[in-house]
Amino acid sequence: MEETAAKPRRSGGGGRQCCICHERRPALKRPKTLEQIATFLLRLHEKSCCINRSTEMLALKICRECFYAVFEEEIHQVIVENQLFKPGERIGIGASGGKDSTVLAYVLSELNKRHNYGLDLFLLSVDEGITGYRDDSLETVKRNEVQYGLPLKIVSYKDLYGWTMDEIVKMIGLKNNCTFCGVFRRQALDRGAALLKVDKLATGHNADDIAETVLLNILRGDIASLNHVFTYAYFKKLDYFSTECIYSPNAYRGFAREFIKDLERIRPRAILDIIKSGEDFRIATSTKMPEQGTCERCGYISSQKWCKACVLLEGLNRGMPKLGIGRSRGLNSNQMKTDKPTSRTKSIESKQCGSLDF
């Protein structure tokens, strides 16, 4: 965990007060993000705050209210310094009902009003068709729609692809089901964004997610802890869904997650170190990068003749679900029989993946 409950000292007044406001009792300490906190302490309290950057910071403790301020200010500064948004833009927020997307929706909504970003915000959810999991989490998203006053759009695998994940798992089993879900979900978000006509799509991730992705890319040879997100959601009592997908226990990512947790128990900074290593990676100049094109079948972005979703769907529809799984497998030129669209001007929201009609 990035944060742990702070235990006030029995003697001495200093340990009983927040190191930022010096008024309220501390609620947590953040030993792994000391420099971040120090920066924002100075930014928020330039005149009144004096920090010892060595021994005193090893026990940096803050109250809930100051934690909210630091957390939200950090996000605001990232938005401003990187010029992520422009006034008048339509922004879609990927909403699964989980803690990461719920915190993102809440904070972005609050900052938009507080700092007058001038954004039109929308919630975008994907219904994979997983009974007992996604149907329950979507109820949370629907409550968030009311709580935050943000319009909600739900796109489903059934409508987009003609299959639900329940149906796919019945055909392929639990070994490679996450391959289908990951490919379909990414494209479903893009299709939903096109339907909403948003300019940008924001998705929520925590440090664990990023570290897992870096490690997975290394393990796959593809270089081309629940942190303060959880604490913020918990203290704010945000309405979010916390059950793990019923089809994910055998996912490759799950093994990477367990490995990272083991590392974290030995070295608390392991997650941040892995992320830093990922940021320092450089792609060799001799590496041949894929060229972006469009899928001949559905018009979606692809570096191949058919996008990955269309290849997977072709396998499902032909009763050969493993056809598109793995780097060495796929459709050859003889198998890729399809009628080319009569017009290349149709956008991806007007075509269904795996067919020529939407």
Image: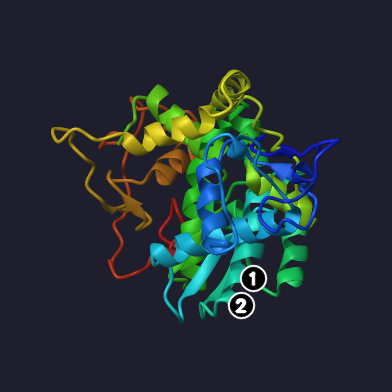
Mark 2 Cα-neighbour bin, 10 Å: few <14, some 14–19, many ≥20: few
Q: x, y percentage for residue 326?
A: 40, 27
Q: Residue at x 62, y 27 (%)?
A: 173
Instruction: Tell me how far mark 2 sits from mark 1, CA to CA.
Output: 5 Å
Looking at the picture, tell me which residue is in the foreground, 278 or 134: 278
- Image coords of residue 140 (percent x, y): 76, 57
Residue 296 visible, this orientation: yes
Element under label 2? helix
- How many C-alpha atoms fall within 10 Å of the one at disc 1: few (<14), some, or many (≥20)? some
The x and y percentages for residue 104 are 61, 58
Q: Residue at x 63, y 63 (%)?
A: 107
Q: Mark 1 belongs to which amino acid?
A: Glu
* Residue pointed to by mark 2: 113
Q: Which mark is residue 110?
A: 1
State which quadrant residue 151 falls in: bottom right
Q: Is residue 321 above or below residue 142?
A: above
Camera-side residue of 59 and 182: 59
Q: Quadrant of residue 181?
A: top right
The percent coordinates of residue 333 (x first, y second) are 25, 37
Image vertical order of residue 205 relative to residue 357, above or below: above
Q: Amino acid at mark 2?
A: Lys
State the residue in front, 221 or 110.
Answer: 110
Marker count (numbered): 2
Q: Is residue 225 left or right of residue 275?
A: right
Q: How is the image coloured?
A: rainbow
| Furthest residue in direction left, as rendered | 286
In the displayed orientation, state which residue is furthest to the front: 12
Q: Is residue 190 left or right of residue 60?
A: left
Element at label 1: helix
Residue 155 visible in the snapshot: no
Look at the numbered discs 2 and 1 and tell me whether their residues touch, using CB distance below 8 Å.
Answer: yes
